[in-house]
Image (cartoon, rainbow, N blue to C red):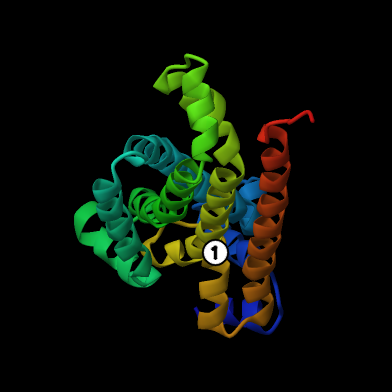
Amino acid sequence: MQALNYRYEVDRIPLATVAFDFLNEQGLAQEQAGLTARYPVVRQLLEHIQLTFIATFLAILLAVPLAIYLSNKKRAAGFALSVTGILQTIPSLALLGFMIPLFGIGFTPAVIALFLYALLPILRNTYTGLRTTDPLLIEAAQGMGMTRWQILREVRLPLAMDVIMAGIRTALIINIGTATLAAFIGAGGLGESIITGITLNDHQMILRGAIPAAVLALAADQGMALVERAVKPKIDY
């Protein structure tokens, strides 16, 4: 173990190469690992994307319909927003810790924790966007004989789309940052490099996790901005 640590810490040989050479000497590995194993950051990036996008997508599936249902139920909406607000205030590591006794360690508890974190911004923004629709527009739509569903689909949702997309965008960026902590419960992601780098006092390894995470957050933000412009209703004056 001292010789392996020396090769990594002093000779600066990549960790994957040190591990492969050792396993090869022991007869446990005979072929070089694939791309994701030779370059762990690639695997970690893919895991990070999977974690954040699945959790955010599941939050959209629940929060948007729930906000639509609650848009005319003020008391129930207040309760739902309070519950999701409480979830949002729980520290990330504490929430991940709560997941371990319930769901064990690994991918599933991390997705559930990120899903819970994403609920508040999506639910709140969707509810707020629907509630702030100009009553005169709703009255005009009713005067034209439109049903409640038609008013929702043709008037309220299009006008609220900016606010809804802003909530989804916020939830996604929050999840990308929070997902770096998912490595503490064995869920993988870019947090692996950051945590390992801190443990080994290896600044390069820390940056190998931190820089892709920051770039991913920026790329996701710009990507959601493009989606927001694409779904924004076009108004002709």
Q: Is residue 158 above or below residue 219?
A: above
Instruction: From the viewer's side, name the closer residue of 124 and 46.
Output: 124
Instruction: For label 1, count other residues whose C-alpha is less than 10 Å away and answer few (under 14), some (14-19) or many (20+).
Output: some
Q: Secondary structure at mark 1?
A: helix
Q: Amino acid at mark 1?
A: Gly
> Could you tell me if residue 39 is visible in this image?
no
Q: Position of residue 180 (x, y in %)?
A: 51, 64
> Could you tell me if residue 87 is visible in this image?
yes
Q: For the point 47% across and 27% down, which residue is it?
A: 152
Q: Position of residue 210 (x, y in %)?
A: 64, 69
Q: Position of residue 103 (x, y in %)?
A: 24, 52
Residue occupied by mark 1 = 177
Q: For the point 53% across and 51% down, which residue is it?
A: 167
Q: For the point 41% across and 48% down, which residue is it?
A: 123
Give the residue at the far left of this rendering. 101
Instruction: From the viewer's side, name the closer residue of 109 and 31.
Output: 109
